[in-house]
Amino acid sequence: MKALDRHWRLAATALAFAAFGVCGLGFSLILFPLASIWPHRDSKQRIIVAVIHTFFRALVAVLVRVGVMKLDVRGARALKRSAERPAIVVANHPTWLDVMVLLSLTPRACCVVKNAHWSNPFFWGVMRAAEYVSNADPVELVEAGARQLARGYTMIIFPEGTRSPTRNRLHAFSRGFAHMALQSGAPILPALMDCDPPAFTKDMRWHDVPERAFHMQVNVLDALSAAELAASDEPPALAARSVTSAIEAHITQHLIDYGFFKA
């Protein structure tokens, strides 16, 4: 029975990845050309972001329904409320699915995306149409993120820049989100991500299906103010460094407290 269950989850995972790729390509080929001629920028982005949110909600629901994954979320209301007051969601990044899960939970969201992904043939168009932010230029990243926050979109950022190196260790956080928070005044929403057993990590292929359905947990912590984490007389560069260190330590400690970092 265990072998049958694993083969079923492998087949379901393959179908989900195929659907993800086909839909991503379809969105790029359809939404990007439409977005380029759409006369109203605000309504264009709002519609595309809503399409992405709905698609990922459906995909997560299917993965849960067919038994590939389990999902528990604490603090989801804070992500939904961010549609009324935009925030900067700062999360650790253990698995490739983190962005999908957070986008499925956040109605009006914009992502910071690795520059390498902008040439992906399946998703280049939809990322541009949704006006996601590239991390290629640190200065432009902050400016573009601040503009999206001002337009009412919550920013989802993985300050490690890539998936975590191991289950019990984080990459050092980059400071872009801190500069963005200090410049915009938007609150920071720390989010803890965990996947047990590990799946879709940096060292795993899509077909490395664990022996049982993986359990994803999302814990959204209370919002923090960047201005309160930095001394009022600090210059911007030092203030951003203080905020980054404080948020990295805050997330790391809560990963330990919640048992997401295993001994």
Image: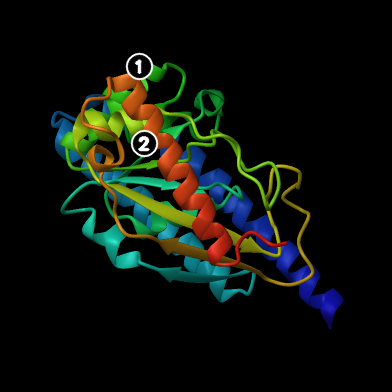
Report the residue marked by disc 2.
243
Would residue 6 be found to the left or right of residue 45 on screen?
right
Q: Find residue 222 and report its horizontal and vertical position in percent.
A: 32, 59
Cα separation, mark 1 vs mark 2, equals 17 Å
Q: Quadrant of residue 151?
A: top left
Q: Amino acid at mark 2?
A: Val
**Residue at the location (29% across, 50% down)?**
224
Would residue 90 be found to the left or right of residue 239 on screen?
right
The residue tagged with tag 2: helix, strand or loop?
helix
Q: Find residue 121 and report its horizontal and vertical position in percent.
A: 55, 29
Residue 139 shows in this picture:
yes
Q: Which mark is residue 20?
A: none
Residue 106, placed above or below residue 157: below
Residue 141, placed above or below residue 201: above
Tally of numbered discs: 2
The residue tagged with tag 1: helix, strand or loop?
helix
Give whichever of discs 1 and 2 has the lower sequence position: 1
Circle 1 Cα neighbour tier, 10 Å, few/some/many (<14 / 14–19 / ≥20): few
Q: Find residue 177 and report its horizontal and vertical position in percent.
A: 37, 34
Q: Nearer the viewer, residue 55 or 30?
A: 55
Circle 2 Cα neighbour tier, 10 Å, few/some/many (<14 / 14–19 / ≥20): many
Residue 159, placed above or below residue 197: above
Residue 128 shows in this picture:
no
Figure coloring: rainbow
Would residue 151 be found to the left or right of residue 108 on screen?
left
Residue 254, placed above or below residue 240: below
Q: Amino acid at mark 1?
A: Val
Q: Which mark is residue 139?
A: 1
Q: Quadrant of the N terminus?
A: bottom right
